[in-house]
Image (cartoon, grey):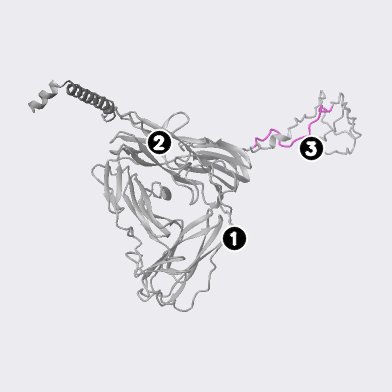
Amino acid sequence: MKDAISKIGQDPQSRATLIAILGIGLMLMALCLFGISILTPRFVPRPTAAPAPVTPTIRIAIDTAMPGQPVTVTGEGWKPGDTVFVGVEGPDGKRSPLTSAVVGVDGRFVTIVVLPADVGAGQPRVPVVAWSSATGSEARILLPLAATPTPLPTPTHTATPVASPLPTATATPPPTPTPSPTRRPTVPLAVWRGEYFANMVLIGYPALVRNDPEINFVWGPGAPAPELPADNFSVRWTRAATFEEGLYRFHAVVDDGVRIYVDNGLVLESWQDGGQREVTADRKMTVGSHALRVEYYEHGGDAVIRVWWEKLTAYPDWKGEYWSNRTLSGRPMLVRNDENISFNWGAGSPAANIPADGFSARWTRTYPLEGATYRFHVIVDDGARLWVDDQLIIDSWHDGSAREITADHAVVQGTHSLRVEYYENTGEARIQVWWEKVTPSFPHWKGEYWSNPNLSGNPALVRNDGTLDFDWGDGSPAWGLPADNFSARWTRTVTFDPGRYRLFAQADDGVRVYVDDTKVLDEWHPSDASRVYTVDLLLTGARRLTVEYYEGTGRARIKFWWQRIGDWPTPTPTATPTPVPPTATPTPVPPTATPTPVPPTATPTPVPPTATPTPVPPTATPTPVPPTATPTPVPPTDTPTSTPAPTLTPTPADTLTPTPTP
């Protein structure tokens, strides 16, 4: 190796070749290093910039909404674990919180708000606002309001069941019954998410959140949990459930208020104070999963809430439930569809598993009715009761032979719930129910009710009201009428004995009173019924009374009555009871200056004295009265004195007329 290098160093040509090779190598090496320096920045990671702050936002899935409609609000970009209030903002910038939600770990929340009935106040859009008191963050969105839908036209025909002749033979035994519980929930096994609030309005952070297998609670005077008060609390339950396609009936047994939503649509509402009661509502469901929400509040007294539903496709007419006792208690022994309630079992029974004596039955259904007055008929042996929209119309719950009971009831146009209960003690068993539309009569007050606060359009309900003393609280006057923003007018004719009367009116909110179409009391403004308005009038004979009323928001109350407080004014008699026609100038009788003496005669002819002087007819110029042919004898006196005729003061005729009645 050394010899080879030595030879290269000695040979000039070899040395030049070596130098050229070394130069080319160095040049190639420089080019490689330069290329690496150019390509290197493309593969070196750049420094990561700080994340931009996320602005809290809210969104609403629907394009428009109506007052009273539930709306789902979704929030993003909020602080995890924070409590966010959601509500609406008025024209004056004042916020009204409607609900609250807790932000999840992903910065999102989902909640449902029910728009108030008076939201927007005529504006096309309403601001929906979400805000946090802890962080000061807020977000808003303008929600367009949809116009109120136009009511459907009144149907031109009525499908009214016709009473069929009573069967004379025992009813055909029914098919094999399919048990269907009525007092226990038939909900598929699932879990409700229960949020319990220490207030009645479901606002703020819930004091307790837990899973409840079913909504079936009887807390009585106690509380749901130690974290909650025994009164003035509320609960919201949510879950999803799978339904078959068909008509379902939702049930709620409640004390005090309850609301049920299906897919954010209000299905059942009884949001008011009241003792334990059962309320129902029917809804057609599509096949698949649906979101359910139940809201409940307890004000005072006992606390009870039970919710369940059942499919009604098996009962297209009357759902008949039969018990082997007289008190409709326990599970029914038989559940079937009955086309009509028209049975005469005689000494027999409805079915083989029902006794001939000591049994009971309940029939329920919904039926479309026009806005009119209906006469409901019941023929029964022994006891029967009939409800229309949970209002007891006929109550004859006692033993007795076959008899017919009727009752007139006015309804608002729509689909109404009907319920008939019956029991048989001993002897013959018979029950028949039907109804017909009749021309209403108004023996007391004719009550007309509107679904608006200004008595405009045709009334939605016309009925007879016995007295004007109603306290509807937060409810409505009848099924189908709103609880707020409605109005009413009552009219009747009353015959008064002559006298002074005081009319009284008390209202929440406005009231007006007319007598014979003359307004005598006008208090048409918001009020809380803390004042009693009065007016005093002289009344006699038949008078037409009209009372008008409107309810804005909150509680609803109206009361009207009257009281006699004095007699009719008595006219004051004048000094002279006999009136004399007035004269311009009374005509005096001039005295005789010198009476003519009467010469004595043997037999003077006496002239009887005149008891009352004859009045002289009035003349423009006083006319002296000439002496009579035969003067009246006057006893002789030393100085004759003339006696002037008395002057009568005329009495105006109108002094005997009593004070006119206002």
Of marks 3 and 2, which one's residue comes earlier in the chain?
Answer: 2
Q: Nearer the viewer, mark 1 or mark 3?
A: 1
Residue at mark 2: 87
Residue at mark 3: 611
User: Is 69 in front, or is 216?
Assistant: 69
Q: Which of the 4 image quarters holds residue 232?
A: top left
**x, y percentage for residue 597?**
88, 29
* Relative to 167, residue 74 above or below: above
Which residue is found at the position 45% from the left and 72% from the top? 430
**x, y percentage for residue 442?**
58, 53
Residue at mark 1: 157
Q: CA distance from mark 1 to mark 2?
A: 45 Å
Residue 276 makes an appearance in the image: no
Which residue is found at the position 36% from the left and 31% from the top? 55
Residue type highlighted by circle 3: Ala
- Decide: few, some or many residues near mark 1? Use Cα within 10 Å; few <14, some 14-19, many ≥20: few
**x, y percentage for residue 72?**
40, 42
Residue 313 makes an appearance in the image: yes
Give left or right: position of 142 versus 649. left
Of marks 1 and 2, which one's residue comes earlier in the chain?
Answer: 2
Magenta span: predominant SS is loop
Q: CA distance from mark 1 to mark 3?
A: 87 Å
Which residue is found at the position 46% from the left and 32% from the top? 90
Give left or right: position of 222 versus 547. left
Residue type highlighted by circle 1: His
Residue sitting at the far right: 629
Residue type highlighted by circle 2: Gly
**x, y percentage for residue 445?**
56, 50
Report if residue 181 lies within the magenta region: no
Q: Which residues are magenta?
A: 571-589
User: Is 548 in front, or is 31?
Assistant: 31
* Relative to 611, residue 366 above or below: below
